[in-house]
Image (cartoon, helix red, strand yellow):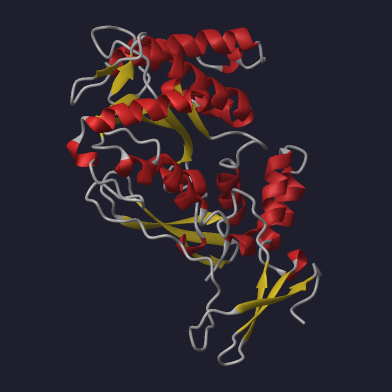
Amino acid sequence: MTELAEVFSRHGPQYRDQFGDKMPPSHRQAMSAIERCRTPVLGGHIYTCGVCGETQYVYHSCRNRHCPKCQGNKAYQWLETQHKLLLPVPYFMLTFTLPSELRRVARSRQRLIYDLLFRVSAEAVQYLARDERFVGGQVGMVGVLHTWGRNLSYHPHVHYVIPGGGVMDDGAWRPSRKNFLLPVKALSRIVRAKFRDALRKADAGCFGDVPAAVWRQDWVVHCQPVGRGWRALKYLAPYIFRVAISNSRILKLADGKVTFRYRTTDTGTLRTCTLQAQEFIRRFLQHVLPRGFVKVRYYGFLSSGLRPRLAALRQRLNRFAAQEANVQENPVDDQGTAVPSPCSEVHCPSCGHVMQRGPLIPPRDTGPP
């Protein structure tokens, strides 16, 4: 199986030679980390099977958040935390998509544009949610930034998972309509205006690079009910801890070209795409986030500073929700199916028994001892 690390190892030097002076540090760090991940360079541990005596050399992970070999168990841990924050009410998923005409600017000023997209979209939601015609109170929001399409195209957008209702000034809960949260056309206009004003105020030297038509066209905003919220969170979790492409999707690296598979968004049809290695690397790296950038954000009564108030609200609402009478300890999906916990144990490839961790392998440049 071809891995992303192999693509970087074989074609990364040429890419660095060609674009090195234009590459942000985060791109260089991601490439280096992925190339070294689970290799002797990072060291590791020796595992031994107490039953059959089999020995395995398990090398350390790079822990870079853009590495396809890392981050596996973090999605489950995040879901466990989110399960404790769920309210027994209907939920909605609200999505704000950056117009295609803004994407060139976004690539070069990622931190600025992504921060603005988060901030102005959250402000627009809270502004309309306060309107008595819709919610009439402060809503809670979990926002997740997602930048890639299934063929590695650049498609920045923010998903929000929002409980259907809000907290009024007196602390009372006011539910939204069952199948309607906020008017998307109004949200589109508000976000467009707020983004324009915020970008101009930032005086970052890029406002003049945005085509004037962007500020006259409709911005894409989508809202849909998503049941009790758990299914939507399960949908978002992989995007938080998954990278733009997994190793299992890379089919071949040959003749300077990379072939990978993907499913089309509209029909779900399985297709393949073949790119020059340099173009493949470029497409992957455009989804590497700036160092320290926070891609999951909480707003309203889901903000970290309001968690005690959220706990009290959840307790109050649970009293009136018969379906929450027997809350299970493990996270469950909308059908009540328990979510299995991932296993971090190393199993013997010969007999299947759990192996015991032994001595540390120090970092080195050669193979296993």
Estimate the x, y position of residue 103 in percent, counting from the top left. Answer: 52, 28
Q: Is residue 141 visible?
A: yes
Q: Quadrant of residue 90?
A: top left
Looking at the rendered image, the quarter that the C terminus falls into is bottom right
Estimate the x, y position of residue 306 in percent, counting from the top left. Answer: 48, 23
Q: In this view of the protein, which residue sits in the foreground, 58 or 336?
A: 336
**Number of residue marks:** 0
Q: In this view of the protein, which residue sits in the foreground, 341 or 173?
A: 173
Q: Quadrant of residue 106?
A: top right
Q: Residue at x 43, y 43 (%)?
A: 149
Q: Is residue 168 left or right of residue 1?
A: left
Q: Residue at x 52, y 49 (%)?
A: 243
- Whether 49 is drawn above or below 206: the answer is below
Residue ranking furthest to the bottom = 52
Estimate the x, y position of residue 131 in percent, counting from the top left. Answer: 30, 7
- Whether 287 is drawn above or below 117: the answer is below
Estimate the x, y position of residue 355 in percent, counting from the top left. Answer: 58, 80
Q: In this view of the protein, which residue sits in the foreground, 122 or 154?
A: 122
Q: Residue at x 40, y 40 (%)?
A: 84
- Whether 342 is drawn above or below 281: the answer is below
Q: Is residue 31 left or right of residue 148?
A: right
Q: Quadrant of residue 363?
A: bottom right
Q: Is residue 154 visible?
A: no
Q: Residue at x 33, y 49 (%)?
A: 264
